[in-house]
Image (cartoon, rainbow, N blue to C red):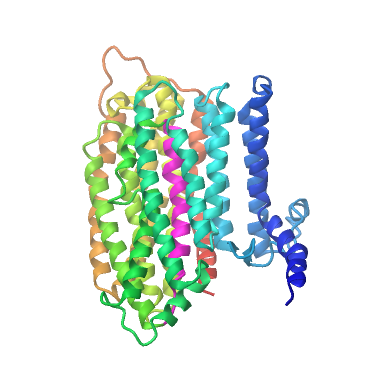
């Protein structure tokens, strides 16, 4: 094909298709520009920044929702108006595959995670309106950072190239550094942001060096070509420590995983997490604990799936890293849960809880690596690992957001985030009582008790580890630690609930009274926790998770 023909194909097909798929992200970019104009012309005094941010987030959410439905039901008359509004076409959004010349990939898996991220953005913006952080003067700056970070996360979910892997991680990380220190004048916030930046810069450098090793060895940066290229290089050679190609690739992958593990706050890259969550506002902590985890796990699945194949070298490679991630899972679960028990600050306790939950979720990725290239189990069993992770992240969105939202909203009434300040919280007004009940639901779901959504999510993760144990015995060890840590976690969550429901408040303290609108918001994000554990929505989410996971193995 001639150069002119290639250029003509790109301009006529590739660019329109890419822009159609990327249109929700473009809407968010326009929203960022609008917020900057508010600052430039001081229009934020007449038009609240939160309104602009919310409208942009809702429009972007509708765009991703339209794409997700169109991929499944392109002929549906129910959503015909939505399809026309976004100008969706069979050769555009309706065609799964790469776009932007192969840098990103468009499929139900990526669209599902983009849908969750935009929904979460809408919920976080609503939380900031209720909590009053940020204020009217700094709102446009805060929402610019929040939306900018979300755009990077949405790009991460569809990364198909090592360059996009690095850019998306940095794009979602850099704004979060600033958001941590956004509360000006708070020494603890500035200190936390400084630690976050230093650790982030260090892991970014390590990850970039790992990317250069991988691309230099394999001669490609495309995920879809890595497994085949490594098989060609290793033809007739054993995967061993004495083989230079094996050692180089293992070192490169370890460095990349270090960067992703930093975003996931996995042990031993978790040191920033407790300090950052304590120093940042609860709103920012909730955003980092959910959104960055979802995007990083989607990116991690994309990256490890790049080495799918049937050659012995790829089987040995995936088995090695499956066991390695199993060790990291054990360490993250155990250290996160044990350290959480000693905390007196609720945000710091939830930070260690986040570390532990990242350990539970990475168990599914470890099981995926053990299963994906094994001759004993097929792609159906590997897909169940991704299905469990997807279901877990969907439930985790609501239960962790509910926990951090309650912390943020109660902080506005008690001016404290220590566990002792929650003594007798249930004795407050009607909305406060509702917040106390919602906190109990969120915490019981985080533990994994039935019949809440967290129980079924954790069972799906554990089942994937059990399946992987039939291939490698070590996964049964990981599963055993997962069960033990579930029991450990019950104690520190109950310690908070004991303060809320049993311990009497101080004699001179006034009952906490929260606005009714606050109670309505928390109830709204708590109901899905119940629905995903004891209603037909559980089956619907399971079917959806199975669908989006299955496309990775077609």
From the viewer's perspective, is 182 left or right of 39?
left
The mark total stands at 0
Q: Quadrant of residue 360?
A: bottom left
Image location of residue 10, percent across then percent down: 73, 65
Image location of residue 195, percent across then percent down: 34, 37
Q: Quadrant of the N terminus?
A: bottom right
Say whether residue 293 is magenta. yes
Judging depth in this view, the residue of 433 and 66 nearest the camera is 66
Say whether residue 300 is magenta. yes
Name above or below for residue 499 compared with residue 505.
below
Question: Does residue 532 show up?
Answer: no
- Which residue is at 29% across, 29% downward? 419
Q: Magenta region: which residues? A: 281-310
- Which residue is at 75% across, 68% downward? 9
Image location of residue 387, percent across then percent down: 46, 64
Name above or below for residue 106 compared with residue 186.
below
Q: Quadrant of the C terminus?
A: bottom right
Q: What's the magenta bit mostly, secondary-structure-wise?
A: helix
Image location of residue 429, percent across then percent down: 43, 22
Name above or below for residue 75 compared with residue 379.
above
């Amino acid at each position: 094909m001639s150069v002119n023909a290639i250029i003509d194909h790109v301009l006529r097909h590739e660019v329109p298709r890419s822009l159609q798929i990327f249109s929700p992200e473009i809407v968010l970019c326009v929203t960022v520009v609008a917020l900057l104009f508010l600052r430039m012309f001081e229009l934020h005094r007449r038009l609240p920044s939160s309104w602009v941010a919310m409208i942009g987030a809702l429009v972007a959410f509708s765009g991703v929702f339209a794409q997700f439905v169109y991929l499944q039901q392109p002929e549906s008359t129910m959503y015909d108006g939505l399809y026309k509004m976004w100008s969706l076409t069979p050769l555009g959004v309706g065609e799964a595959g790469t776009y932007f010349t192969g840098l990103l990939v468009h499929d139900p898996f990526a669209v599902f995670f983009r849908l969750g991220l935009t929904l979460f953005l809408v919920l976080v913006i609503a939380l900031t309106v209720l909590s009053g952080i940020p204020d009217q003067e700094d709102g446009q700056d805060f929402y610019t950072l929040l939306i900018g970070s979300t755009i990077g996360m949405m790009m991460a979910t569809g990364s198909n190239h090592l360059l996009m892997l690095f850019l998306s991680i940095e794009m979602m990380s850099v704004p979060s550094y600033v958001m941590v220190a956004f509360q000006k004048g708070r020494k603890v916030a500035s200190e936390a942001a400084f630690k976050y930046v230093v650790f982030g810069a260090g892991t970014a450098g390590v990850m970039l060096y790992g990317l250069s090793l991988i691309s230099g060895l394999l001669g490609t940066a495309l995920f879809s070509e890595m497994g085949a290229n490594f098989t060609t290089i290793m033809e007739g050679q054993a995967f061993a420590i004495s083989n230079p190609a094996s050692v180089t690739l293992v070192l490169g992958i370890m460095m990349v995983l270090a960067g992703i593990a930093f975003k996931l706050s996995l042990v031993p890259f978790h040191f920033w997490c407790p300090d950052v969550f304590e120093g940042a506002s609860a709103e920012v902590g909730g955003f980092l604990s959910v959104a960055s985890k979802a995007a990083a796990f989607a990116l991690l699945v994309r990256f490890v799936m790049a080495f799918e194949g049937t050659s012995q070298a790829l089987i040995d490679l995936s088995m090695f890293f499956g066991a390695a991630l199993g060790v990291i899972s054990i360490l993250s679960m155990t250290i996160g849960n044990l350290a959480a028990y000693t905390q007196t600050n609720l945000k710091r306790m939830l930070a260690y809880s986040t570390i532990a939950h990242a350990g539970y979720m990475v168990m599914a990725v470890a099981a995926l690596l053990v299963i994906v290239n094994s001759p004993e189990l097929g792609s159906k069993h590997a897909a169940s690992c991704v299905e469990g992770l997807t279901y877990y992240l969907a439930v985790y969105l609501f239960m962790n957001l509910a926990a951090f939202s309650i912390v943020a909203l109660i902080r506005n009434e008690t001016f404290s985030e220590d566990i002792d300040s929650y003594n007798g919280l249930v004795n407050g007004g009607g909305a406060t009582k509702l917040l106390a009940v919602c906190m109990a639901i969120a915490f019981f779901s985080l533990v994994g008790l039935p019949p809440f959504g967290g129980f079924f999510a954790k069972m799906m993760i554990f089942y994937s580890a059990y399946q992987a144990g039939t291939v490698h015995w070590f996964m049964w060890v990981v599963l055993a630690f997962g069960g033990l840590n579930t029991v450990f976690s019950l104690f520190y969550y109950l310690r908070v609930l004991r303060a809320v429901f049993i311990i009497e408040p101080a004699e001179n303290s006034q009952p906490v009274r929260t606005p009714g609108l606050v109670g309505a918001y928390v109830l709204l994000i708590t109901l899905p926790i119940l629905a995903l554990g004891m209603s037909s929505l559980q089956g619907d989410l399971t079917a959806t998770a199975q669908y989006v996971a299955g496309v990775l193995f077609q």
